[in-house]
Image (tube, rainbow, N blue to C red):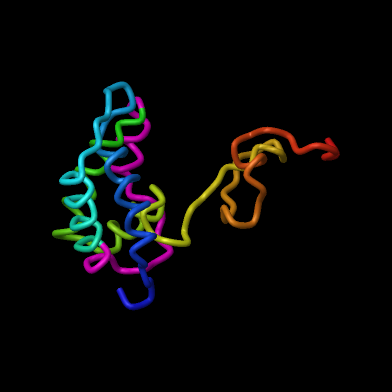
Amino acid sequence: MSEYQVTEEDMRGLSIRLAMLQTHYRKPKDFSIAELNQCAKTLRRWLAAAIPNDDREPIEVMLALCDDLNTPQAVSEMHRYAKSDGRKLFASMKLLGLIPGHGKALDYDYGEVKTLPIDHIPLVQWVGFPTVGASQ
């Protein structure tokens, strides 16, 4: 994907993220260099197969996430999309923060959940803490 330039620094961070997503949050996680290298290889393959678009997230990935945040199942679906549907792969990668520059954050300040580009809001708001002096 020539539109998305991925630096080695990006790849390190994305590889760690993918390694974490491949393990259910209730299971212990032991990182190894071999696993991170495999994640980087997978990400390069996925980035080559992904077709940029503004499609909604695939229902299979959303169902996996709604099932006790089953990220390993979501990653499994993404492996399938890499072979068959680059559009769904891109939408899934974007949702899980695996496309550089496409992170999303939730904003609860307005009574409804919205997505905002992560670089447009302060970290304290992103994690849900009110800012000092913020009007309510």
In the image, taking residue 27 as reference, residue 131 lies left or right, namely: right
Pick the residue in front: 48 or 35.
35
* Residue 48 lies in the magenta-colored region: yes
In the image, taking residue 127 as reference, residue 12 lies left or right, namely: left
Compared to 69, does 34 lie above or below? below
Corner quadrant of residue 66: top left
Pick the residue in front: 47 or 32.
32
Residue depicted at x 30% and y 31%:
70
Compared to 84, does 97 lie above or below? above
Where is residue 17? Give x, y as percent.
Answer: 35, 45
Where is residue 22? Give x, y as percent.
Answer: 25, 38
Residue depicted at x 25% and y 57%:
43
Compared to 24, does 110 lie above or below? below
Q: Magenta residues?
A: 47-68
Corner quadrant of residue 42: bottom left
Quadrant housing the C terminus? top right
Pick the residue in front: 2 or 70.
2
Where is residue 24? Give x, y as percent.
Answer: 28, 29
Residue depicted at x 38% and y 71%:
4
* Residue 58 lies in the magenta-colored region: yes
Quadrant housing the N terminus? bottom left
Where is residue 77? Give x, y as percent.
Answer: 22, 45
Residue depicted at x 35% and y 35%:
65
